[in-house]
Amino acid sequence: MRKPRWWAELSLIGVVYAAYTGGRLLVRGDEASAVDHGLAILRLEGLLGIDAERPLNRLFTDVPALGIPADFAYATLHYLVTPVVLVWMFRRRPAHYRAARAWLMAATLLGLVGFTLLPTCPPRLLDAAHGFTDTMAHFSAYGWWGGEASAPRGLGGMTNQYAAMPSLHVGWALWCGVMLWRYGRTPLVKALGVAYPLLTTVVVMGTANHYLLDAVAGAAVMGAGFLLAPHALRVVDRLRGTTVRTAGTEGGTGAGAGAGTGEAPPVVSGGCETFAGEHIPGQRSAATAADDTSTPAR
């Protein structure tokens, strides 16, 4: 299989990410329904006994040595590690790159569907009575962000703060982890593959940007993307093959058709062979032909 061209891959990823970012902005839900969804998730976690967000958030708020690095991790790693792993796959594991890229894109687009169907208020935007502190706003003096997630100050309008379910911070980190674990060749790289998604899950909950079930949904979206990606690749290959065949047919109607394609040129006579002394095919009768074959040579 031909290795993908870097400029084509960069253009494709840029288009998909632009569509994803624009889609997030276009599907903003209303605040009331987003808050209702957030509280419903919190109640469900309480019933299941898995509401680990509050103790983590209190820890990150009370211990700046944990909260500030976590804020930087939330604001940067999501946008740095994923492209780095993509480039690493492109350069070092080209045989597996196309499938890996298709998996990431399919899951990302599925995440956009989740944002559309279930706008969700993150814990940090709930009323303070629910016991959460927005650590990024609390420690904003140490970074470039303000009180609107990880967006730089003054650019909060360029992000959808209710796009919390599923957590693609966790989903993308899981994708990176699988790539590092599966294709890394050293124990250190494989260990990073395990640690990175786990660390990201702790960070998104400790900073009050996501619920635990957001993280679970992020992992589920990646699983669905993994199952969908091979089918998407087959459709793309089929469309590409149809396009190539159509182009070959249109370009091969002239006198030079078939040249350079490796195919044998067609037989001009089309099976209408003539015998000696014959001007048109079938001029002689079958009996005459039989007599010729039975007459001994002189």
Image: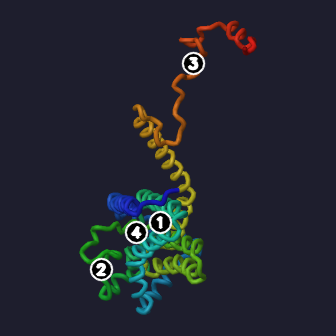
- Circle 3: element type: loop
| Residue 28 sits in quarter | bottom left
| Closer to viewer: mark 1 or mark 3 | 3
Number of the label disc, if any, that sits on residue 121: 4
Decide: is 210 above or below 14: below
| Closer to viewer: mark 4 or mark 3 | 3
Instruction: Give the amino acid at mark 3.
Output: Cys
Crowd band around label 4 with a 10 angstrom C-alpha radius: few (<14), some (14–19), many (20+):
many
Number of the label disc, if any, that sits on residue 146: 2
Q: Position of residue 254 (x, y in %)?
A: 40, 32
Q: Which residue is mark 3?
A: 272
Task: Residue at 29% x, 67% y: name it.
Answer: 158
| Residue 164 sits in quarter | bottom left
Instruction: Give the amino acid at mark 2.
Output: Gly
Instruction: Give the amino acid at mark 1.
Output: Pro
Number of the label disc, if any, that sits on residue 295: none
Crowd band around label 3 with a 10 angstrom C-alpha radius: few (<14), some (14–19), many (20+):
few
Number of the label disc, if any, that sits on residue 166: 1
Question: Alpha carbon of mark 2 to alpha carbon of mark 1: how far?
Answer: 23 Å
- Identify the mark nearer the N-term, 1 or 3: 1
Give left or right: position of 102 versus 183. left
Give yes or no for contact between labels 2 and 1 (Cβ–Cβ under 8 Å).
Answer: no
Question: Alpha carbon of mark 2 to alpha carbon of mark 3: how far?
Answer: 84 Å
